[in-house]
Image (cartoon, helix red, strand yellow):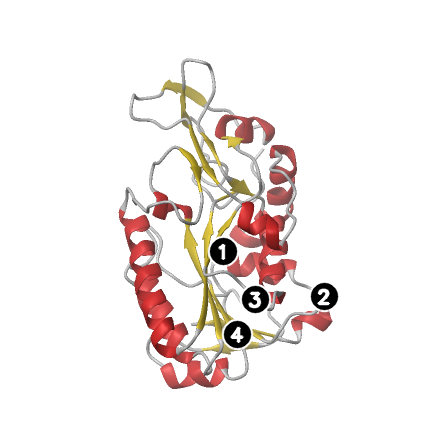
Amino acid sequence: MNFPDTLVLGATGRIGRLLQLSWDQPAGAARLLWQGRASVGLEQATHQVILDPLENPAGLTQAAMGRQILCLAGGIPGRGDLGDNWRLAEAALRAAPPGGRVILCSSAAVYGNQSGLLDETTPLRPANDYGKAKLEMEQRAAALAADLGIQLCVLRIGNIAGLDAILGGWRPGFQLDQFVDGSTPARSYIGVSTLAQALRGVLALPQLPAVVNLAQPGLVQMGALLDAAGLSWIARPAPEAAIARVALDTGVLQGLLQLPEAEVAQMVQQWRVLEPHITGKQEQV
């Protein structure tokens, strides 16, 4: 399956580098244009454009000509300005060709700490500044896309195994909440290679919903994920406010793409293969 002509914004971030490593088919790669502010991090990109989307809107518009836009760019806690989530989304929408399509990467953080099965119509109650920034991005982007006549799809991505605060954030002495029944927090996850596969599938679809939860079906216990990776952790009593299970409803996504059920061993294996190339670190065992 070849890619439609696509401009990938934020290609030097961790997801962008993951996609460069995963989307290695020459026929498809020829239709991808990878954007970064510098060439560092674009070593795997066959076709690249170096520019700052916020400082060079004309260059961004030229790069987007005839292409849909996948916007991976944005600020995350401790790394960049959270306000850039909206500013970069706005830049992508204004650069898109008339009638074109923009796919924005949001986060399950917009749902906050709500329990139960969360679908795309669930009221949004972000519990932290990152979730609030992503919600602002979603709301303002939807309004601007309607004004400009741009097709917009927002992907609310669940925990990415290896790019998360658990497997990816593990350190010696790592502590994890444990409930009275012995379980640890369970969340919706997606493996890094499965994420690349899903994003490739999304780009190829002729029509997309306005909002899609992006995760593998099923829940993953954080303790089980660390156990599968052979990483030790220290149990601490979960506070009363801790939510045991937060699950994204993936029904919309499964109607578009068939992703496999979440399975911790497979997620860990996917991360072990790609982690050294994304972070430059040796594999943790």
Marks 1 and 4, how far apart at CA: 21 Å
The quarter in which the C terminus is drawn is top right
Going from N to C along the chain, the mark reached first, 2 or 1, is: 2
Going from N to C along the chain, the mark reached first, 2 or 4, is: 2
Instruction: Report whether residue 39 is seen.
Output: no
User: Dot 1 lies on which element?
Assistant: helix
Going from N to C along the chain, the mark reached first, 1 or 4, is: 1
Instruction: Report whether residue 11 is seen.
Output: yes
User: Dot 2 lies on which element?
Assistant: loop
Q: Where 182 sits versus 165, above or below?
A: above
Q: Residue at coordinates 47% horizontally, 45% vertically from top-left? A: 158
User: The residue under label 1 is which amino acid type?
Assistant: Arg
Count of number-bearing discs? 4
Marks 2 and 3, how far apart at CA: 16 Å
In the drawing, does residue 84 fall left or right of residue 195? left
x, y percent for residue 233: 47, 24
| Circle 3 residue | 207
Q: Nearer the viewer, mark 3 or mark 4?
A: 3
Going from N to C along the chain, the mark reached first, 2 or 3, is: 2
Q: Nearer the viewer, mark 1 or mark 4?
A: 4
The label shown at residue 96 is none
Q: Residue at coordinates 39% horizontally, 86% vertically from top-left? A: 58
x, y percent for residue 164: 46, 42
| Circle 2 residue | 1
Going from N to C along the chain, the mark reached first, 1 or 3, is: 1
| Circle 1 residue | 14
Q: Nearer the viewer, mark 2 or mark 3?
A: 3
User: The residue under label 3 is which amino acid type?
Assistant: Gln
| Circle 4 residue | 68
